[in-house]
Each structure stands twice: as C-alpha cells, then as structure tokens.
Image (cartoon, rainbow, N blue to C red):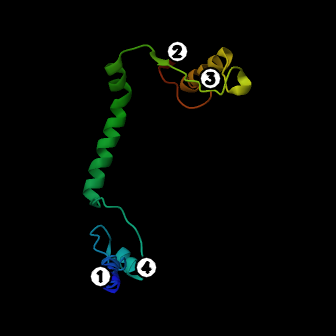
Amino acid sequence: MFLRRSATVLAAASLLLSACNDTVRSDTNLSLEEQATAAAGLIRSCGTDNLSADEIDAVEADVRAALRLTPTYGAALRGTGSVSVPVWFHVISKGAGTANGDVTDQQITQQLNVLNDAYAGRTGGVATPFVFTLA
C-alpha cells in the first residue's frame, strides 16, 4: 500500500514538474530578439501588449493635450482658494509620558507645520492649495 501511494505521488510530482518548463516561452509581447534571449535563459516580461509606434504617438499626444489643460481645468473643478484637509493623529503608547510613546501637543503642531510647509512649496517642490488642520 505504501509503495503504491509513493509511486502515485512520484508520478504526479514528475508530471507537475514537467509542466513547469520555463525554457519554452509563449509570450506574444516578446520581439524576435527577446525570444532569442529568452531561449538562452529565463527572463520575465510584462503581460501587457506592446503598442505600435502610431499608438504610442497617439497616447503621447493625448497626454500633452491633457497637461496643457490641467492647470485651468483642475482649478475650474475645485474652485479657487485653499482645500482644508482635516488630520487625525492616533497615538499608541505603552503608558503615560513621552518616554512611553506619548506625543505632546507641540509635536503634533510641529508635524502639521511640516505638512503645510511641504504642500505650500516652502521646502521645495510646487505649492498646492492643500492646508492641513487638526480635526
């Protein structure tokens, strides 16, 4: 009985392993050069279809057109002025006091200032209309 079960398990394992042949590629996204490289060794590739040159040009034109519209279009959608973002801080500590992980009100205010400075463009980058407030 044990010998029969072992033989069955061995046969199933060999079938499974032979089905996992990574040297044969059926990826339609690979060029002929990439297929030759794949035949020499295992490579992974994206499962997304490759775009033609015309499709790439069309997508790039759409993106350029959208970028030209974004500053006025985005502002028209949300209106003028700042966008207030309420922020909640959840503090998990071992006990009372900063030695046990508590955070002071001053530290919370300082962190809100860091967020506001970053999103206002004061620390580099682009100024945004977002203002973070303690909820």
Marks 1/2: CA–CA distance: 66 Å
Q: Amino acid at mark 4?
A: Gly
Callouts 3 and 2 close, C-beta under 8 Å: no
Q: Amino acid at mark 1?
A: Thr
In the rendered view, tell whether residue 125 sits above or below residue 13.
above
| Residue bearing mark 1 | 8
Marks 2/4: CA–CA distance: 55 Å
Mark 2 falls on what kind of element?
A: strand
Q: Amino acid at mark 3?
A: Gln
In primary-sequence order, the first of circles 3 and 2 is 3
Residue 12 occupies which quadrant of the picture? bottom left
| Residue bearing mark 2 | 133
Residue 92 in percent (x, y) is at 59, 27
Marks 3/1: CA–CA distance: 63 Å
In primary-sequence order, the first of circles 3 and 4 is 4
For the N terminus, give its image quadrant. Answer: bottom left
Q: Residue at x 40, y 68 (%)?
A: 44
Mark 3 falls on what kind of element?
A: helix
Marks 3/4: CA–CA distance: 51 Å
Nearest the viewer among 81 and 16 is: 16
Left or right placement of residue 86 versus residue 102 in this view: left
Marks 4/1: CA–CA distance: 32 Å
- Other-residue count near label 3 (Cα within 10 Å), few / some / many at <14 / 14–19 / ≥20: few
Residue 89 occupies which quadrant of the picture? top right
Circle number at residue 41: 4
Q: Residue at x 42, y 82 (%)?
A: 40
| Residue bearing mark 3 | 111
